[in-house]
Image (cartoon, rainbow, N blue to C red):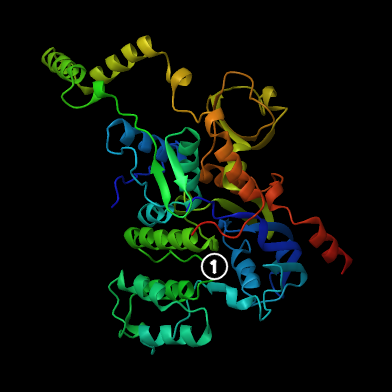
Amino acid sequence: MTDLTFLPDRTALEAVGLGVKYRRRGWALRDCAFRLPAGRVCALVGPNGAGKSTLLALAAGLRRPDAGRLRVFGGEPADPGVRPRVAYVGQDKPLYPSFTVADTFRMGHELNPGRWDQGVAERLVRAGDIPLDARVGTLSGGQRTRVALALALGKRPGLLLLDEPMSDLDPLVRHEMMAALMAEAAERATTVVLASHVLTELEGACDYLLMVADGRVRLAGEVEDLLSAHRLVMGRYEGEGVPREFATHQVVEARARGRQFTALLRTDGPVAGDWQVSEPSLEEMVLAHLRAPAAPALIAPSAEPRPGFRREVEAA
Amino acid sequence: MRVVEFRIDRRSGVATYLQIVQQVKQALRLGLLTPGDKLPTAKEVVAATAINPNTVLKAYRELDREGLVEARPGLGTFVRRSLARPGAAAGSPLRVELGAWMERARAAGLDREDVAALVASVLEESYGSPEQTGDRPAGDRPLHDTAHATHDATHEAGHPAGAR
């Protein structure tokens, strides 16, 4: 196991001009364009109502876009050739309450002929001391989450879509589930998209980031590339507005507290002047962008949809 | 058999892959890892730490580049050379002397932080600041260029999933 899990040339998800319109709320997603290379573990972040769940539902083939296109492994999400390779765990984790855990896995086996891995699914529930003959309806929220994840991983998907999967788990179980996910990613080079509010749980686990806000893509790319494009600067400043030496950079967010001045910059070369400069954490970078909705989007080259696909969509 | 276990501190501000690099080096210095030992696989590390597998592989590649470990395809990553110095081992004269010095410092009323500050300042006098000597990732070294170049070529060609 010496090769990286990601394959820069292969694409798991790709969107151009993607839009979804709800009758009452208007556009949930608008003109979204991005690419997610295969084998990445991608954090999908953004405020409530930003369009995260809508995006996952599109990728799972549960909804059709109202504008533009989204491709999964080069095909339509609902294609019979694509669907078996995608597993989706929604926020409400639908399971049959009257089924036992064993029944649930038998259903997984029946619905995924030739793919189902009983061992993976059973290992995950055994590690949580859940008896196979327990009825799903009698399990706690955290235990149900474990069964839902086991059902998804038992499918051995190429793409695993998780919508706020860890929200009802205690910290120990959350760590265990994340570790199981990462082990799966390491072994099978599974592409994972993980929508979550808990930024600290994503840091370290995710190597790719997709941030949506107001239905648009704000940040997309390899976490490392995005972080190294930004600098957190701190220092003493009492002048008006933004210090002049920042003029060559793009100021994402600036805040003054008394004499102390803090800013997140998208830097172009080194920062001049007497400032304490550091690379932001994932959390700092995302929070600054959430507080500054007017800051321009940053799409890393690896996250740009390929020109061929773009032409294809635009011609249609 | 797992020889080392990594401890990842997400709040430390040190990149995760560098924490692994530093911990392997520390284990090599202390003799916890010796030539021929197998490092845990990426899957074993992530199953324990819940970090991204690519981070582990990046750390191992950095150690490979520095000539400390080598990847044997299909077998794993193995320690090539040790960083242990006989002079630093338990029971060595230097360590005994330092122990005696610490006892005198404690007797003189210095607390842990005083001693740490004193050691850091003498360390800097003798060895220079860490930026000049430290643990930053080294540039390419001619000795291992070839091995590394092959690696990269494999990735660029996008060969089927390596991580198994």
**Outermost residue, top direction?**
B125
Residue type pointed to by label 1:
Leu
Does A8 appear above or below A269? below
Q: Residue at x 30, y 84 (%)?
A: A134
- Tag 1 subunit: A
Which quadrant would residue A247 be assigned to in this image?
top right
Q: Is residue B144 visible?
A: yes
Quadrant of image for the C terminus of chain A: bottom right
In percent of the image, x 72 and y 69: which residue is there? A20
Residue B74 location (% of width, % of height)? 46, 55
Q: Is residue A243 above or below residue A197?
A: above
Q: Residue at x 63, y 24 (%)?
A: A271
Disc 1 packing (10 Å; few <14; some 14–19; many ≥20): many
Q: Is residue A221 visible?
A: no
Q: Residue furthest right?
A: A315
In percent of width and height, residue B105 lies at 16, 14
**How many numbered marks, from 0 up?**
1
Tell me: B88 left or right of A270: left
Q: Find the residue positioned furthest to the left.
A: B107
| Front residue (pair B62, A164) | B62
Residue A70 location in percent, x, y?
A: 72, 67
Q: Secondary structure at mark 1?
A: strand
Q: Position of residue B113 (x, y in %)?
A: 25, 22
- Residue B44 is left or right of residue A115, and the answer is left
Q: Nearest the camera: B52 or A149?
A: B52
B97 vs A198, left or right, is left
Q: Viewer-proximal residue, A300 or B130?
A: B130
- Residue, disc 1: A160
